[in-house]
Structures are given as structure tokens and as C-alpha cells.
Amino acid sequence: MAGMAGERVGLVLDAWVKARAPVNIALIKYWGKAPSSLPEDANLPAVPSLSLSLAGLFTETWARFAPDAERDTIRLGGRPLLPEEMRRAVALLDRIRAVTEVASPFEIITVNHVPTAAGLASSASGMAALAAAAGRCAGLDPSVPDDLGLLSEIARIGSGSASRSVYGGWVAWEGRRAHPVAPRDHLPIAVVVAVVGRGRKAVGSRDAMNHTARTSPYYAGWVQQAHEGFADALAALAARDHARLFAAMERSTWRMHASAMAADPPVFYWQPASVAVLREVAAMRADGILCGATLDAGPHVKVFCDPRDSEAVSRRLTTVPGVEDIIETGPGSGLEMQVGDEPSVGGNDDSQESA
Ligand code: 2P0
């Protein structure tokens, strides 16, 4: 195999490597890219973001070297990737080959364990699991902190938010890579997802954020306020101040969506039921339930609350007209790796879900 002189310890030459990576939700949003021209600078963010990795929602990916193949092959939930998905994944794999000086193509099998209509993007967990599985084959060791940081950087090349999905718990992303800021048990949190408008296809976040940057007069304001909101959320997290954290999350959410709605033509993700859920969140707060809401590049509303209130929150959100499903989750762990695990089949193919 060209370039494989064995100079790196820990190459996995003859076995599959399995990686599992979690979905994450941003409280402080990534919306906009810094200008770049080099492939390794893809998806550098214009703004810092803060996320929570989620329990029970993840991608599993198996990778092995395919030295005799002409090119990388990737199957997702039993089908080949779409051309655009493949382009992003190969850019990521090319970066692994460049930094590890291993020239071989990879064979990849990947399965998303995210409910099809959850409104939770699997691109973040998918690209993080891909970076981890292929990176481990090529000798990057996720148990070494700097290698894990490098995997975050490489995952980012596939999808920006994937940089955050290599870590569990609370994760910040600024510049080239993400870094963990607090473990999953740092403060008690439940996340209740109100699924609305199932089946409607939203504008993809990559096109939407680039379009916002090009055409929205509010984009400059969005970027200008981002560091302050990020610092406020980090301080709230450090102080375990739920109310302040939820307020910072909601400000980031409204400002991200306002910049997108002011694009020309507008990018408008909300459905009537999204607004109805937001009104119910306000009503719950008026009733003394501490909670906060966020939306990403889709109509679904994610409600953060104290785990002691999650049952009440779920019950009340179920009654909102237009809410089609409720998914309860909470803080999850980061990458899990296994060398020598043979691929299993199954899982959902929901790679087209929007964030
Ligand atoms: C986030 N989103 O911070 C924000 C909030 C959607 C809304 O990151 O172009 O799929 O692949 O870097 O990571 C979704 O954007 O975009 C996203 P690319 P990505 O979670």
C-alpha cells in the first residue's frame, strides 16, 4: 500500500474500526463561514458556537483500508452516498490521508440511529464518526487529546457542526476545531424535541447560511454580536445558571433566524406549529416551569428544561396542534471506538434531514 511504511504506531491494516458519534444541538449557533480557499480550511466558522451532545441519537460507522480499490466506497444505510455527500466525505478522507501520509482508499459502511423525522441533523454525527473510524485506521488515536482535536478539525471539513460531535457533553467550537467545556453531568438538563411539519423538506443549512451571508443586511449584525452571546452562554454554563443559559440560547436562535429571514429571497424555517410551540413554551414559563426553546434549519422546536420537568413539558407540547411527535433526550457521551468489530446492518437512512 503506497505510503504505508509503518512509521506511525497504531495503524489498523487488516480489520474494521467502528466509531460511534453523537448528534449535537447548538445553543449558540454556527451560521456563516469565514472566507477560505484551501480544502483544509473548509467550514471555518464566522462565529463561535456552543452545543450539547445528545444521548441515544448517533451514527455508527465502520472503516477499513481498501488498498486494491480505485477509490473510496461509502454505503449509508445500505445505499451509496449522493454525489454531494460523497464529495464532502472524500474531502474529509483526503485530509486524513494528507495528515497521516497514508495513501490507500477506504471502504466505509455507516448507519444513522436517529429517528427519521426527528429534525436532528445526522451530518454532524455522520461526519464525526467517519473522521474517527477512518482516522483510527490511519493511526490517529482518539484517546490522545491532540489526536482527538485533530479528528474534530478533520470532521469539520465534512460538515462544520461535526467538529463538535467528537466530544460528549458541552462543547465549544471556535476556529479550526472544537473543544470540550463541561462534562455531560455538569448540570441537569433534558431536551424535548417537538417534531412539526414532518416530511416537508427545508432548505439545506449550507446553502441557507451562504445565501444569508451574501444577501441579508442583518448578517453583519449577527456576526458582530456573536462573541458576546457566546461568552454570556459560557459564563451561564460555568455558573450552572439555567435561566441565563436558556436566555442566551433563545437570543442566538432569534438572531440567527432573523438574519436568515432577512435574506433575499428569505429563508423561513418556521411553520405555524413552530410558533404555537414557542407560545406554549412562554406559557409554561409563566406557569413557573424553567425552560427555553431553540430551532435550527427546520421547523422543529427543541425545548431545554430541568429533567424533573421533562414529563410535564412533553405532556404540554403533545397537546399543541401540529406537533406530530415528541422525542425526549439529554446530554450524551462523545466518540466510542472499537477495533475489530464487523459491520452490522440496519438503522435509518435519514441523511437528508435538516438540522
Ligand atoms: C448549528 N446548524 O450550530 C447550526 C444552527 C444549523 C443551524 O451547524 O455547511 O450542516 O456542513 O458546515 O454543519 C448545520 O450546518 O453546515 C448547523 P456545513 P452544517 O448547529
Image: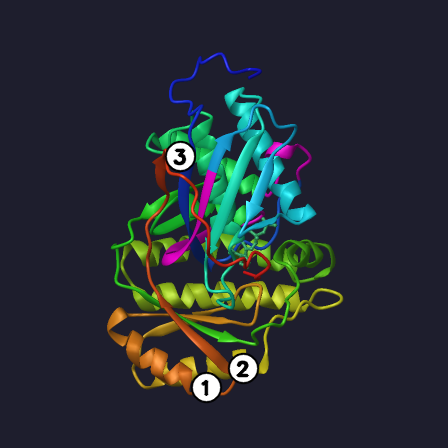
The answer to which quarter of the image holds residue 8 is top left
Q: Nearer the viewer, residue 136 or 42?
A: 136
Q: Which image quarter: residue 261?
A: bottom right
Q: Position of residue 184 (x, y in %)?
A: 29, 53
Q: Are marks 3 and 1 in contact (CB under 8 Å)?
A: no
In the rendered structure, which segment of residues is drawn in magenta? 36-62
The amino acid type, in three-letter code, at marker 2 is: Ala
**Label 1's element?**
loop
Q: Which element is circle 3 on?
A: helix
Q: Is residue 161 above or below residue 305?
A: above
Q: Earlier in the sequence, mark 1 or mark 2?
A: 2
Give coordinates of residue 302: x percent, y percent: 44, 69
The residue wearing badge 3 is 148
Q: Is mark 1 within 8 Å of ligand 1?
A: no
User: Which of 68/337 is in front?
Assistant: 68
Amino acid type of the residue tagged 3 in the rendering = Leu
Nearest to the observer: residue 345 or residue 162 = 345
The residue at which mark 2 appears reads as 273
